[in-house]
Amino acid sequence: MASTPILLLTAIPEEFIAIEKHLKISKRTLLWHQFSCIEGTLFGKKVVATITGLGKVSAAITSQQLISAYHPQAIILTGAAGGLAPDLSVGDVVVSRDCLQHDVDIRTFGFPRGTLAITMEESMIWRILKADERLRKLALSTKGTKHRIREGRILTGDQFFTTAHRTDFQYLTDELNGDAIDMEGAAVAQVCYANKVPFVIIRTISDKANDTATQDFSKVKTTITHNSLAVIKSILMSP
């Protein structure tokens, strides 16, 4: 198992370019005939890195394709998220304690919001998807970034939230206790659960999911890249 790679996934091209610059590349292929997928060594560990594409379906397809091809020992998903918790500032890092898909809603059948009823067997009804404890602790121990790092719950859905689009905002925090919100994390986590692959999600807060969200996101890409590389280094350089 130790000889299998760690998958590094991001939806942000700038992050992938930064990883590519640091990685000693041994092989390059195309994923979906579009995204560059690179294999090699990074901080002493065997890795495979690529871009997931935006949204839950793209991220899930990419994750499953690479899990099937490489049988990885773990997946690290990095990138950006909107901040929901009031104590989070732009530039802070949230390490997933757990995650769930906030836009899955089968409450009419008696399930709480976010429940994934793969089948009606109890073992296949998932909701809160927990990150790997070891990966989470390594991420939380990261040095080399001036921004705050804390764990939290990441909510995932196929929306980029601003105040204008949030007609029903309160359930994200009041009901689901979300700290940050993204468009890929819990979808990748679901694929990892199905394949029994350890995972952790690393999200830099790019905005506060409000009226200035789109402008804030474009300004903070350098910070996102720096934070992600620092956390990846912390995990990969561990014994």
Image (cartoon, rainbow, N blue to C red):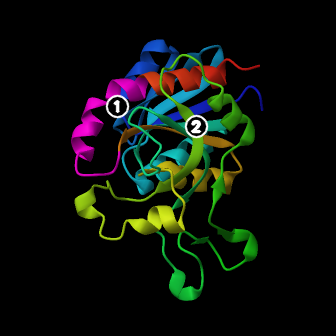
> In the structure shown, which secondary structural element does the residue marked by tag 2 occupy?
strand
Residue 38 appears in view: no
Give the labeled residue for mark 2. 150
154 vs 103, left or right, is: right
Q: Earlier in the sequence, mark 1 or mark 2?
A: 1
Please tell me the numbered disc located at residue 13: 1
> Where, quadrant-wise, is the N terminus in this rendering?
top right
22 vs 191, left or right, is: left
194 vs 230, left or right, is: right
What is the crowding at mark 2: few (fewer than 14 residues within 10 Å), some, or many (at least 20)?
Answer: some
Q: Quadrant of residue 10?
A: top left
Please tell me the numbered disc located at residue 233: none
Residue 33 appears in view: yes
* Amino acid type at image mark 2: Arg
- Measured as percent of width and height from the top left, residue 211 is found at 23, 51
Range shown magenta: 208-225
- Measured as percent of width and height from the top left, residue 99 is found at 57, 54
Vertical placement of residue 42 versus 95, above or below: above
Q: Is residue 228 magenta?
A: no
Type of secondary structure dominating the magenta stretch: helix
Q: Residue at x 34, y 31 (%)?
A: 13
* Amino acid type at image mark 1: Pro
> In the structure shown, which secondary structural element does the residue marked by tag 1 occupy?
helix
Q: Residue at x 29, y 70 (%)?
A: 167
Q: CA distance from mark 1 to mark 2?
A: 25 Å
Front disc: 1 or 2: 2
239 vs 146, left or right, is: right
Q: Is residue 212 magenta?
A: yes
**Nearest the camera: 178 or 186?**
178
Vertical placement of residue 200 versus 44, above or below: below
